[in-house]
Amino acid sequence: MGMTLKEITQAWESRLLELYGRFESNPLLRPVNEAAAKRLAELGLPGKKHEMFTFVSLRELFTIQFEFQYGPEKAPDEGQVKKHVYPGCEQSYIVLVDGKFDEKLSNVVSLTGLITVAPLEKGPDIAALMDGVKKENDIFACINSLFLSGGVSVEIRDGTKLETPIQILHLSTGIAGKNTFTSPRVIVNIGSGSGAQVVEKLAGNPGGHFFNAVTEVNMKEGASAQWSRVQSGGAGGFHFSKTRIRMAKDSRFKGVGASSGGKVERHNCEVRLVGEGAELTLRGLAVLEGTEQAHSYFRAYHEAPGCSSYQLFRNILRGASVASVDTAAVVRPGAQLTVSEQLINNLMLSGTARADMKPILMIHADDVKCKHGATVGRVDENQVFYMRSRGLSDAQARALLTSGFAKSVINEIPFAPAAQEADRILLRKLE
């Protein structure tokens, strides 16, 4: 008889504690690690009924004996890095190798005098890190802090309008014969009245690995950001991430994510609109096949009047793939004149795929405009018939309709080279 999920979970938790017992911590980040150990004991690993993991099966993850990767067996050279750098970012890219900021492989020459880039432990964010750990509600973000040994802090000065996009490149190298995990941490502070475009890319290790990242974006008054994220880091891995965004008065954040899935991919995004007039726009697309999984858990907290949030998620599923979207807009008391829209669309290309959805509105104010919707369906046969009547074959008609469903999100990626890569990676899976 096999082990129960509870027994598997307990064994994995014991493994974590064993790894932490021999963890080679960075002395400057040791207080963060210790605070995370205390918080981990309070939270415990999630069970079947945990709110954040309603649709996510962690059994396979918990059966794998990972080793924490302190660094690559062989450091990547400049050529290996540059093949992942987008055109237009040749002098504005930041590289993290196996979770650690590599200053030598990074190049931010074109941003000199406009931004400050520093190893996390040398940046101004240690106190904020400690405060965040004590309030952490996501166990995997807590595990990131438990094994935090590096990362990067980016400071964009007040009144700075960056004309060149910043690329943040995560490279995962792996160790031969081992399942490894890394804990990247990125903090980006955008100054008052500043504007930036950031494109984040995951690449590298195609084998068994656990990428467990945390990204924090702090936006001051009047700041604006366009953030793109392309996940192409191998179908054999587990890709977990948490993004925290804090938005001050009149700030604007537009985020677009494109995912090719993995054994289990999970993104937890927590946004706090704390200043009047803040505006959030999120778009997400996943194209899955085989037994790939992609799960999104989003919470937008409207904490000030006159804020707006718009969320659109689209999934295309083939084979026995699984996708879920659990999204909520929470309107706090006093956050009048809130506008919130949530829409989830799933296109099913097989009878064995599964899509789960849970859009939620939690409203504690009386002068708001909030709505949500969700759909699950197949390619519209009427549209197929119409296109066939115009000379297309059945296969051509279905391919065109499916790619159009995906492109409606891909075309929202503001940085053309990232949009082109997402188009190539995701639409190739639909051929």
Image (cartoon, rainbow, N blue to C red):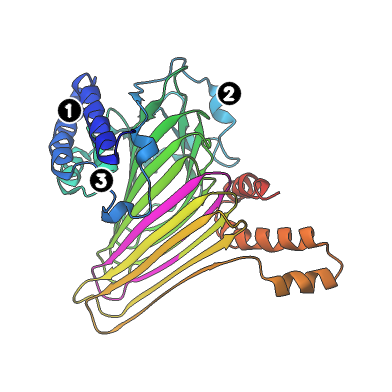
Front residue of 317 and 222: 317
Q: Nearer the viewer, mark 3 or mark 1?
A: 3
At mark 3, the secondary structure is loop
Residue 299 lies within the magenta run: yes
103 horizontally vs 417: left or right: left
Residue density around tag 2, few if under 14, some if 14–19, many if 20 or more, within 10 Å: few
Inter-mark Cα distance, 1 to 2: 34 Å
Query: Where is residue 329, by image quadrant?
Result: bottom left
Residue density around tag 3, few if under 14, some if 14–19, many if 20 or more, within 10 Å: some
Q: Position of residue 83 (x, y in %)?
A: 59, 30
Q: Residue furthest bottom?
A: 367
Question: Which residue was labeled with disc 3?
Answer: 46
Front residue of 302 and 138: 138
- Is residue 284 visible in the rendered image? The answer is no
Q: Nearer the viewer, mark 3 or mark 2?
A: 3
Q: Position of residue 146 (x, y in %)?
A: 22, 33
At mark 2, the secondary structure is helix
Q: Could you tell me which residue is drawn at 44 percent across and 42 percent down?
A: 264
Q: Could you tell me which residue is drawn at 38 percent across and 46 percent down?
A: 57
Q: Which mark is residue 79?
A: 2
Q: In the picture, which quadrant includes the N terminus?
A: top left
Residue density around tag 1, few if under 14, some if 14–19, many if 20 or more, within 10 Å: some
Front residue of 271 and 94: 271
Mark 1 residue type = Arg
Question: Which residue was labeled with disc 1?
Answer: 30
Q: Could you tell me which residue is drawn at 69 percent across and 64 percent down?
A: 401
At mark 1, the secondary structure is helix
Q: Position of residue 300 (x, y in %)?
A: 32, 63
